[in-house]
Image (spheres, rainbow, N blue to C red):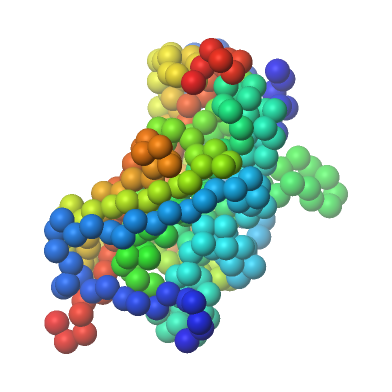
Amino acid sequence: MTATDTGYDIAFGPVEEAVAMVGATTPVRFGTIDVNEAMIRHFAAMTRDANASYWDDEFADHQWGGLVSPPAMLMIWLMPIEWQPGGGTPLPLFMARIPLPGDTFVNASTDTEFFAPIRVGDHLNVVEELVSVSDEKRTALGVGHFVTTRGTYRRQDGTVVAVNTNVLFRFTSEPAGEAR
Amino acid sequence: MIPGVDYSQRYWDDVVEGDELPEVRDEITYRRVIMNPATTWDYFPGHHDPEYARSQGQPTIYINTMHFLGFIDRLATDWGGPASFIARRKMSMRNSIYAGDTMVGRGRVTRKYTDESAGETRHLVELDLSVENQHGEVCAPAVVHLRLPRRPGA
């Protein structure tokens, strides 16, 4: 298995390297797209969510001042785009860029506070911080480390719309049969 | 009003601690899992490549975090109505939902309270939610703090 198998350009290194990074913050990163109706409708179609705030412009204008993003889409507005004209590799997710031995990852928990609605036309940016890296742990999936990061999401006028604390389990995969 | 769209609203005044949320069931077909990369731009191969999923020790492809979060948001706001606002949501991942599974959402009101910390009185309820599979295994327990409007005239 190689680093590119996950589809993300994940960083490898001993756990000491990751621990030394605790407290580090990223530069401000801007989304490549604005919050938009097409992606909101497509997401709500996936979750089968009939909420008028996502489907009825008139209702949403009156209630929120515009069509709103489902809260679950927060991270999507900062997803790196697959390709850009003129080249340049999109920056991989911060949580994958922490150097550790594990060759794959799963999400363990997500805790998000929302302070203001995220509306169509908003352009979000995020600053991420490495909060902690656990000692080596064994779970049903394999051996690895829990990586906690915190992202502060702002819209174009500087208002903090959300703060998201995420725990990722970065581990060495074991073939089917041994795990689970 | 658009037919099929959900406009029904719940008011904070009418909520009683212990109230149960209606169960929400959703069949997760292979196509629905593939909608994860399509709608969330998350191309992690565990959500579209069964061979990769098996190499990770999983039986087949499984839904991503944002799909779980979206289902939990839906569970909360289907009950709360379109003028409710998710103020905080904490979710833990215990088990995966695989292509072919049925996702079952359940929940209960554990607390009804007001919060003054933002310089105004906010009316909230705390919901204890769980996303289970068709075998009754808890895949993603969650706690949502949902802001609800007051009943007009209350």
Quarter of the image that includes the N terminus of chain A: top right
Can you give x and y, in whole percent of width and height, for residue B88 in the image? 33, 53
Pick whichever, A161 or A58, lies toward us: A58
Q: Is residue B107 visible?
A: yes
Nearer-the-camera pick, B111 or A146: B111
Residue found at x 79% / y 50%? A84
Give the residue drawn at x 20%, y 80%: B151
Q: x%, y% of residue A131?
A: 41, 32
User: Hey, which residue is sitting farthest front in the picture?
Assistant: B135
Viewer-closest of B28 and A73: B28
Q: Quadrant of residue B8?
A: bottom left
Q: Residue A118: x and y, percent? A: 48, 65
State left or right for residue A178 relative to residue B149: right
- Residue B80, image x and y in percent? 31, 67
- Residue drawn at x 43%, y 67% is A117
Residue furthest to the right? A86
Whether residue A99 is visible here, answered yes or no, is no
Q: Is residue A164 left or right of residue A4?
A: left
Residue drawn at the location 37% of the way across and 51% of the way down: B105
Query: How many callouts does the rendering have?
Result: 0
**In this view, A129 is above or below A51:** above
Location of residue A93 with respect to A63 vertically, above or below? above
Q: Is residue A156 above or below residue A137?
A: below
